[in-house]
Amino acid sequence: MSFKLKRFLLFFAASLFLAATVYAQDEPSLGDVARQQRQQKDKSKNTPGKDTKAPKVITNEEIPEHAASASKPGSDTKAQTATPSAHDDEAAANVTSRIRDLKNQIADLEKQIAELNDSIRYAPANCVSGCVQWNEHQKEKQEQVQRMQAMLDEQKARLAEMQESARKAGFGSSVYDP
């Protein structure tokens, strides 16, 4: 290579390096940006503004079971309504078991439908003998899948209805969605 070409390439490489360092110095690094945002977030948390509310602190006395015991010793009506009775626990267990049983039935039916769908195989076009009977049997399987799907839809609707009635009765999500 000639001397002029080497000098030109060296000058070009140096100018590229210089331009890259100048460009890199203009923008802050990703770590600096994250650090600044974290500091701004901390400042906004520490300085309460017009939009921020102080969090509400709930004490034991405000909880219903403690509020009943903190009130007059002669009034036991609040204490009775605040604590669930054994009857409520039995009802919750009964609802939970019925919902769980229905969910298991739905899962079994879905599994049966999937297995039956996987077993449906129509005869190929180049079938020689017994093709019509084979295809009729596969068609019967397909109709059975449709009947099972209708049953599945009914059971899912019944499950949703049971869960909604349990929710409306005041049971927690651990009861209506076990």
Image (cartoon, rainbow, N blue to C red):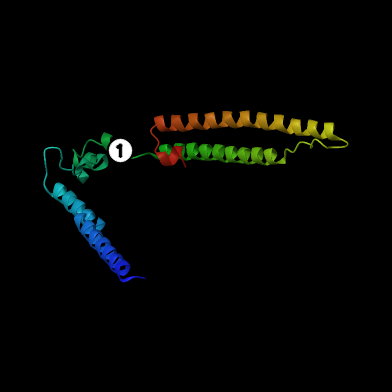
Count of numbered marks? 1
- Percent across and percent down for residue 53 are 15, 40
Q: Does residue 61 appear left or right of residue 5 in this picture? A: left
Q: Which sits in the foreground, 166 or 53?
A: 53
- Examine the image and state in which quarter residue 10 appears: bottom left
Other-residue count near label 1 (Cα within 10 Å), few / some / many at <14 / 14–19 / ≥20: some
The part of the image, by quadrant, that contains residue 102 is top right
Residue extending farthest right: 129
The amino acid on which the numbered mark 1 sits, given as a three-letter code, is Ala
Expressed as whole percent of the image width and height from the top left, the position of residue 106 reads 58, 37
Residue 156 percent location from the top left of the image: 54, 32
Q: Residue at x 67, y 41 (%)?
A: 115
In the image, taking residue 42 as reference, residue 1 lies left or right, namely right
> Relative to 11, is 155 on the left or the right?
right
Depth check: give the residue in front, 99 or 49: 49
Residue in front for this viewpoint, 87 or 12 = 12
Q: The N terminus appears in which quarter of the rendering?
A: bottom left
Image coordinates for residue 140, horizontal then vertical, percent: 75, 30
**Residue position for label 1:** 82
Tell me the quarter of the picture where residue 142 sits.
top right
Instruction: Residue at 58% x, 28% y: name it.
Output: 154
Give SS at disc 1.
helix
- Residue at coordinates 20% horizontally, 53% vertically from top-left? 38
